[in-house]
Image (cartoon, rainbow, N blue to C red):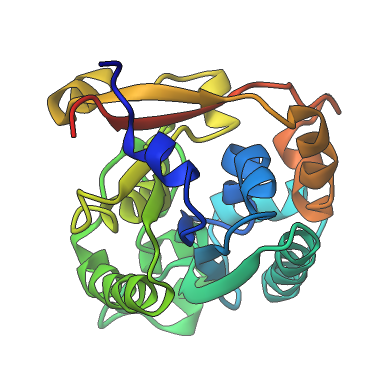
Amino acid sequence: MPHVSRLDRSMRSHAPWLFLSPHLDDAVLSCGALIEAQAQGRDIIVATLFTEAALAPHTRAARSFMRQCAVTDAVELFAARRAEDRAVLTSMGVQSIHLGAVDALFRQRTRPALGSSAWDRLLPELTHRYPTYRFDIAMGRISRGDRRLTRMLQNDVDALMTATGADLLFCPVGVGKHVDHLITRGMGAGYPEKLVLYSDFPYDLASNPDHARLASMQYQPWTWSTGLEGKQPRIRQYATQVDALFPAGVIPEKAETYFVPQHQ
């Protein structure tokens, strides 16, 4: 008898699905075609974890990101991003929930004793949990200082799983090793019987998932390619982000990849 995955089985029903999105675009970037197709016949809820910025001063990495987005005010930028996300998901027939955690680029540590406003302005990296992108955010190491935040987010996700009655919980597999994506992936650990992992687009254009980890979990790929032609216009609706994500102006059409257990 051919193997039927939990995702195949759930698609035969009309049970709700809960997608966890690290940032205000990741769910649509990675799963938009499947989400839009399935939203016609079931409740789809997208909960985004990291939906806030913080006041200046900002690190060099954060300022670089803001320049890419052609803005100077991070708080205003994230207000615009939340509005974009609500508009896109509503137009897809999807419920959006913003959990309100601060994006890693702006997350601050407890200020040191010598941490005056003068020190903050001189070297904001001293007071930020992830001072750089390349050597902190994208290194795949979650700071111990994020443990309390992670527990709070887990409580929120647990409450959502109960409230929605979700049959499946979709989390990023963590391609690119961004700490916010890894924290979001960890939210699924308590739901092994419901967990589906998704490949992080566009990170997966340049990097591969952790195949050793997936093999240890006995997860295998599952692809979805229906409706990809409608996904690109949805991505472009995230107007504050699309130029930074795709500076050449071209959004590659790539089948969505999910990972499900080999044996259930």
Residue drawn at point x = 74 percent, y = 22 percent: 252
Q: Quadrant of residue 56?
A: bottom right
Front in this rendered view, residue 178 or 158: 158
Report the number of numbered marks: 0
Residue 242 at x, y percent in the picture: 78, 42
Q: Residue at x 81, y 36 (%)?
A: 230
Q: Nearer the viewer, residue 217 or 130?
A: 217
Q: Position of residue 116 (x, y in %)?
A: 41, 83
Q: Is residue 188 left or right of residue 251?
A: left
Residue at the image point whose x is 76% and y is 37% from the top: 231
Q: Residue at x 56, y 73 (%)?
A: 97
Residue 260 placement, left or right of 145: right
The part of the image, by quadrant, that contains residue 5 is top left
In the rendered image, residue 92, in percent from the top left (x then y), is placed at 75, 57
The front one of 227 and 41 is: 41
Q: Position of residue 206 (x, y in %)?
A: 53, 18
Residue 3, relative to residue 96: is it above or below? above
Give left or right: position of 250 versus 222: right
Q: Residue furthest left?
A: 216
Q: Is residue 53 visible?
A: no
Instruction: Tell me which corner region of the image, top left, top right, bottom left or bottom right, holds residue 262.
Output: top left
81 w.r.t. 130: above or below: below
Q: Which of these two is toward me, 197 or 185?
A: 197
Question: Is residue 6 visible in this depiction of the protein?
Answer: yes
Query: Split into 4 quadrants, where in the image is the N terminus?
Result: top left
Q: Quadrant of the C terminus?
A: top left
